[in-house]
Image (spheres, grey):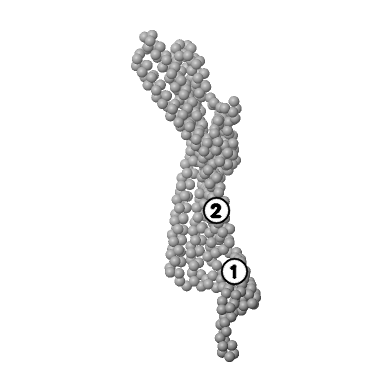
Amino acid sequence: MIDIRKILILAGFFLSPISHGHAMSLLDAYEAALQHDPTYRSAYHENEAGQQAEAIGLASLLPNLSITHTQNKSSGTITGKTQTGQSVSDVVTFDSQISSLTLRQPLINLEAVASYRIGKAQADSSRAKFTGRSQQLIVRLVEAYVETLLAQDHVKLVEAQLVSLEELKRVNERMLIKGEGTTTDVLETQSKHAIAQARVIEANDELEGAQLKLEAIIGQKINQLDRLSDAFNTRAIQLQDYDNWYALALERNAELVTQRHAVTSGKEEIRKSFAGHTPRVDLVASLSKNNRGSFITRNQDAELGTIGVEVNFPLYAGGRVNALTAQAKANHARAEADLDAVTDKVLVELKKQYNLLKSGIKKIESLELAVKSAELLVDATEKSIRGGIRINLNLLDAQQQLYTAQRDLSRARFDYLLAYLRLQLAAGTLVLDDLRNIASYFKTSLR
């Protein structure tokens, strides 16, 4: 007979979380990810650079002030004639310094106006893109966190299966020696045992990959993670009507907002290119000081001040302006097509996650009943074994059914939480409070 107590103790050991020290919660992992995740840090600095686009565009509308200083040493010969007609040569050597201060203020410059609007659109686009990347960090983190927990559960499950098969293998071998078993039973058990060993190796490889993915996000080694609480309540998440989610997504989805700013930028790019046909008017003022003059006005200092209006009328640039305008129009049309494509993708994702969230409630309820039924089956099988009606192999099958139901229930609950986050991401409403809400479904494990 198989030692039932031994199997239960080993199974309980493999199905309980093993920890060393304090477990890392979701919020702890998020704080670490903000500091270490390379993708997020790249997005942060990209946004920093993008915010300068507005200032760069504004600069073309503001005054341009410059100072120029030139210092020369001149040497030459001046030849002339006296009143009597005699030629006279005079060697002249002098130093000269010319300093000027120039101010240029655009008065009419449609190209500069368009450049400023393009810079503003690019800054807004960069800001929206960073918002989306920040929201994606939450989803990526929870996905990696959940994948690691599921991989841990998978390892424990296949290890429990291996323990059960090892015990069954020993029993069959003893029964064969006593003449109560068959060689076929032994060979069949050995085959299942070998397959279980391979599954343990595969599950450990899967766990290592999941841990490495999570560690790459948080920038530190993982000792233990919080486990999903048994007190799981799907009613804690309030699900609005789909029409409300639809309206939110069109208005606030980060990808859509980013692409709309790209369309605006493309429209201003057309105006900027076409501005090559329009006149430019600048206010120009300067102050200059010329010490020691020139060969003609040597030994004389001069100070000059000028102010006026400079008008530039473009006439012909070899067709460059027309070509740039046509190119800008094509790029604008492409941006509008990209906006339509992004809109379709976002709405498909929104509907998918909404449906998964709704169906997830019924799926969880069904699997909760399956787990309860499997638990009752294990209890009934134990009683039947004590009564001599069932054998221990039936208990192994019942326990296997319970482990599988528990694993499927955990996966369904994780999928439900992820669908909630992905729905918020698609709607553009994902915030830190949503992560706190998800974190409340986990319990801290202290050993």
x and y percentages locating residue 401 in the rendered image: 45, 23
Query: Is residue 369 or residue 209 the one in the foreground?
Result: 209
Q: Could you classify mark 1 by the number of other residues whose Cα lies within 10 Å: few (under 14), some (14-19), or many (20 or more)?
A: few
Task: Name the one closer to the observer, 407 or 352.
Answer: 407
Element marked by disc 2: helix
Report the amino acid beneath label 2. Answer: Gly
Mark 2 crowdedness (10 Å alpha carbons): few <14, some 14-19, many ≥20? many
Viewer-side residue, 150 vs 346: 150
The quarter holding residue 333 reads: bottom left
- Tell me the residue at 47%/14% (across/down): 3
Q: Give the quarter of the image for residue 58.
A: bottom right
Above or below for 228 versus 60? above
Do the residues bearing badges 2 and 1 touch, measured as CB atoms within 8 Å? no
| In front: label 2 or label 1 | 1
- The answer to whether residue 359 is above or below residue 83 is above
Which residue is labeled 2 in the image? 50
Q: Which residue is under mark 1?
A: 70
CA gap, disc 2 and disc 1: 38 Å
Provide residue 31's location: percent of width, then percent of height. 59, 39
The residue located at (50%, 49%) in the rendering is 255
Q: Report the number of numbered marks.
A: 2
Evaluate whether residue 248 shows in this view. no
